[in-house]
Amino acid sequence: MRKYEIIFVIRPDAPEEEVDKIVHQMEGVVSGTGGRVERVDRMGRRKLAYRVRRHREGIYVLFVLEGGGETVKEFERRLKVTDAVIKYLTVRIDEEEKRAAKLKALRAEEAARRPKGKAAAAPSAEVLPAKE
């Protein structure tokens, strides 16, 4: 099972009921193919960076899910045939999370090696002869 983020944009003139219907349909697709939805964020109406199918705005929805290739294939196929969806993007994030966890562990290890306390943190003061 791999982790994916799938974000898609729905037409801005779509009614709220249609947005709910699409979200529930996509949740069903994920669970029907053996995947698991971790999070669904409805980010609301936002301005697009460029025109997409004559629209300047769109309703953004973000899915974070765990599943296999079949889950993503079916999810994307359903997005393609849904008229209200004007754009989508799928990103695999499991490797990025592994990298972040590894980096976090290295930083924690490095922090554990550093001396603690005020006296240890300050550089040692040497007694230098006074300048004349």
Image (cartoon, rainbow, N blue to C red):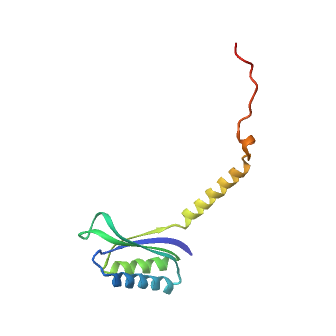
* Image spot of residue 8 (x, y percent): 38, 73
Q: Residue furthest top?
A: 132
* Image spot of residue 19 (x, y percent): 36, 81
Q: Who's the residue at 41% across and 85% down the image? A: 25
Vertical arrangement, residue 43 with respect to residue 34, above or below: above
Q: Who's the residue at 30% across and 79% down the image? A: 14
Vertical arrangement, residue 62 with respect to residue 113, above or below: below
Q: Nearer the viewer, residue 35 or 45?
A: 45
64 lies left or right of 45: right
Q: Who's the residue at 61% across and 61% down the image? A: 101
Q: Who's the residue at 71% across and 35% down the image? A: 123
* Image spot of residue 61 (x, y percent): 40, 74
Q: How many marks?
A: 0
* Image spot of residue 70 (x, y percent): 48, 79
In the picture, the quarter occupied by the N terminus is bottom right
Q: Quadrant of residue 119?
A: top right
In the picture, the quarter occupied by the C terminus is top right
25 lies left or right of 56: right
